[in-house]
Image (cartoon, grey):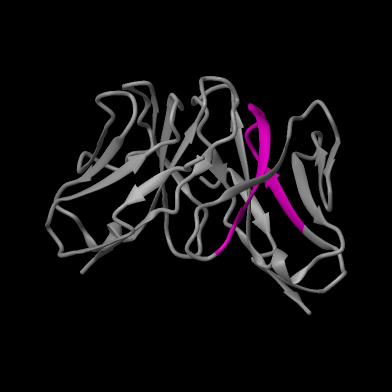
Amino acid sequence: GAGVSQTPSNKVTEKGKYVELRCDPISGHTALYWYRQSLGQGPEFLIYFQGTGAADDSGLPNDRFFAVRPEGSVSTLKIQRTERGDSAVYLCASSPGQGRDTQYFGPGTRLTVL
Amino acid sequence: QQQVKQSPQSLIVQKGGISIINCAYENTAFDYFPWYQQFPGKGPALLIAIRPDVSEKKEGRFTISFNKSAKQFSLHIMDSQPGDSATYFCAASGLTGAQKLVFGQGTRLTINP
C-alpha cells in the first residue's frame, strides 16, 4: 500500500517568506507526527496529532511554526517569516493509533531558506 | 539537553563483519527503544525495537542488547553487507510526552566489500 507522502520534496524560499509543507499519512492512521532533521543530526520532534487535535506541540521552536490537521488525515506545517536557521528536512510520520505503534516516516521535505 | 547519546558517529566495517552501535539514555521514564535505518534522500525506517522487560531481541542479522541498570542499549549487525551501508539512529520514548521519539545523533555505517 501507499506510504506516507510529503510535498513538495524540495522547497527553496527567501528569508521572511511564508511556507506550507504537506503530509499525507497512511490511510487509516490516526496519529501523525512532524519532526525536523538538520544536516548530520537525528530527527527532532515538533508536534503530534491524535485525530484532528494537537496532542503535544512542545517541540515547536517558536510561534512562527504552526501545524493543522483539520479532517484528521492530511496535515500542513506552516512556517511564517522564515529564517535561514529553519533550513532542514521536515519529516512527517504516521502510526495506526494511540498505542505504542511503529511510526512510519515519509521521505521528507527539504526546506532551504536563502 | 541531549537525552539520547549515540556512538560512534561513523563506522567502517568489512563485509561479513559485525557492526556495533551504542546508545545511552538519561530519562528513566523511557520504555521503548527502537532503531531506525535511513538511506540518503529517504525517511527513517524502523529496523528493530525493544522494551526494557527483556535484555535482548534478535531479528535476522539484527540484535538489540539492552542494559537497564546502565541505561544503555546497542545494535549489533551480524554478517554485515554492503547493502547495510546507511545511517542508523537509536531512539527512545516514554509513557509521558505522548509517543514522541527522542533520537540519537546517528551513526553513518559503511560496509566495505
Q: Is B57 or B2 nearer to us in this picture?
A: B57
Residue B39 percent location from the top left of the image: 57, 62
- Seen in the picture, residue B67 relative to B16 is either above or below; the reply is above
Residue B80 percent location from the top left of the image: 81, 65
Q: Which residue is at 12% across, 58% downward?
A: A16
Q: From this viewpoint, which residue is outermost toward the bottom?
A: B113
Identify the image quadrant of the C terminus of chain A. bottom left
Q: Is A45 or A53 nearer to us in this picture?
A: A53
Q: Which residue is at 51% across, 22% downward?
A: A97
Q: Label the magenta part by its dominant secondary structure.
A: strand
- Seen in the picture, residue A70 relative to A77 is either above or below; the reply is above
Q: Say whether residue B61 is visible.
A: yes
Q: Is A77 or B61 nearer to us in this picture?
A: B61
Give the total number of marks visible in the rendering: 0
Position of B55 compared to B9: left or right? right
The magenta-colored residue range is: B21-39
- Seen in the picture, residue B22 relative to B55 is either above or below; the reply is below
Q: Which residue is at 57% across, 56% downward?
A: B105
Residue A18 percent location from the top left of the image: 14, 51
Residue B64, quarter of the rendered image: top right
Q: Say whether residue B108 is visible.
A: no
Residue B45 percent location from the top left of the image: 59, 48
